[in-house]
């Protein structure tokens, strides 16, 4: 079918079908854009997504807070132990100390 060249103004069946599919797609898209039921479903889905995102974000924040709290408690304990060791050393080396071990 060499005469089916689009330059000659003749369209092949494939091109005609493609054009019809595209037109149907455009009509469906325009209909969805103005359909209140579809818009309501779309808005509800968007709200659900946002709510789920907020919940996940809060869970992440809570987990981060828990980790930071645990680390701060651990650091405080380490600091307390280290300070106790330092105080022992200071008592031993202080002038006039009665502990001479």
Image (cartoon, rainbow, N blue to C red):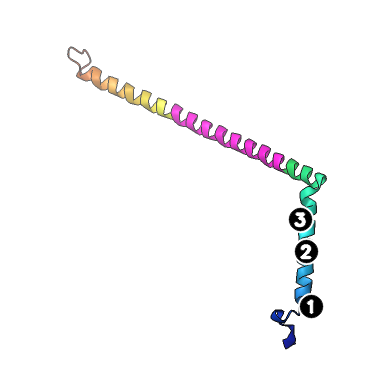
In the rendered image, the quadrant that contains the N terminus is: bottom right
Q: Name the residue under label 3.
A: 29
In the rendered image, the quadrant that contains the C terminus is: top left
Q: What element carries label 1?
A: helix
Q: Give me the residue at 36% from left, 26% from top.
A: 79
Q: How many marks?
A: 3
For the residue carrying disc 2, how many other residues have a C-alpha within 10 Å: few (<14), some (14-19), or many (20+)? few
Q: Mark 2 points at which residue?
A: 23
Pointer 1 or 2: first along the chain:
1
Question: Where residue 49 is drawn, which disc sits there?
Answer: none
66, above or below 32, in the image = above
The answer to whether residue 63 of the structure is visible from this angle is: yes
Quadrant in the rendering for residue 81: top left
Q: Distance between the residues labelled 3 and 2?
A: 10 Å
For the residue carrying disc 1, how many other residues have a C-alpha within 10 Å: few (<14), some (14-19), or many (20+)? few
Q: Residue 99: x, y in percent?
A: 23, 15
Q: Is residue 38 left or right of residue 89?
A: right
Q: Residue 90: x, y in percent?
A: 24, 19
Pointer 3 or 2: first along the chain:
2
Q: Residue 47: x, y in percent?
A: 71, 39
Q: Mark 1 points at which residue?
A: 13
Q: What stretch is highlighted in magenta?
A: 46-73
Q: How far apart are marks 1 and 3 (CA)?
A: 24 Å
Q: Residue 86: x, y in percent?
A: 28, 23
């Amino acid at each position: 079918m060499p005469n089916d060249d689009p330059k000659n103004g003749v369209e092949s069946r494939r091109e005609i079908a493609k054009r019809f599919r595209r037109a149907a797609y455009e009509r469906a898209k325009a209909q969805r854009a103005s359909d209140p039921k579809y818009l309501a479903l779309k808005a509800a889905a968007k709200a659900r997504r946002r709510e789920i995102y907020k919940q996940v974000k809060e869970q992440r924040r809570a987990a981060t807070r828990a980790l930071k709290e645990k680390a701060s408690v651990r650091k405080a304990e380490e600091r307390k132990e280290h300070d106790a060791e330092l105080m022992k050393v200071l008592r031993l080396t202080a002038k006039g100390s009665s502990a001479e071990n």
